[in-house]
Amino acid sequence: MERGKSMASAKSKIKVKIKLKTRKSAAKRLKVSGTGKIMRRKGWKGHLLSGKNATRKRRLSGAVEITKDNLENAKQMLPYGVK
């Protein structure tokens, strides 16, 4: 480094691409389908299942696509998708 130049000016010339961090809580709850849709589980099927009939429990099974309102937030939380 040349005399009189600060360390900050020397570092500013180096271009570094910042790694984006995946939110692990979102990665555990959301999955990306083969076509790129972000899927989630339906709620209300975690406990107290004896009070729900079979049709209701079956309807709550499976994954659904997240709504367009939450899509932008989910994409920010999962910058590289989910594996």
Image (cartoon, rainbow, N blue to C red):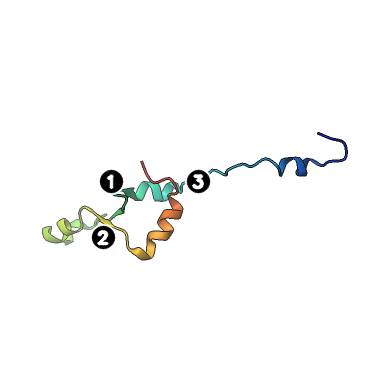
> What residue is pinned by disc 1?
34
Q: Amino acid at mark 3?
A: Lys
Please report whichever mark, 1 or 2, sits nearer to the chain's N-terminal start: 1
Q: Nearer the viewer, residue 1 or 77?
A: 1
> In the structure shown, which secondary structural element does the residue marked by tag 3 occupy?
loop
Residue at 27% across, 54% down:
46
Find the distance from the CA under tag 2 to the CA under tag 3. 30 Å
Q: Residues within 10 Å of mark 2 (few under 14, many from 20)?
A: few
Residue 21 position, x and y percent, is: 50, 46
Disc 2 residue type? Trp
Q: Name the front one of labels 1 and 2.
A: 1
Q: Which of the 4 image quarters holds residue 73?
A: bottom left
The location of residue 14, given as percent across then percent down, is 67, 40
Residue placed under numbered mark 3 in the picture: 21
Pick the front one: 27 or 57: 27
Q: Residue at x 82, y 42 (%)?
A: 6
Badge 3: how crowded within 10 Å, few (<14), some, or many (20+)? few
The three-letter amino acid code for the residue at tag 1 is Gly
What element does badge 2 sit on?
loop
Q: Residues within 10 Å of mark 1 (few under 14, many from 20)?
A: few
> Residue pushed farthest right?
4
Please tell me whether mark 2 or mark 3 is closer to you in this view.
3
The residue indicated by pointer 2 is 44
Q: Quadrant of the N terminus?
A: top right
Q: Secondary structure at mark 1?
A: loop
Considering only vertical position in the picture, is 32 above or below 54? Answer: above
Q: Which mark is residue 79?
A: none
- Counting from the top left corner in percent of width and height, residue 2 is at 84, 35
- Quarter of the image with the C terminus in it: top left
Q: CA distance from mark 1 to mark 2?
A: 26 Å
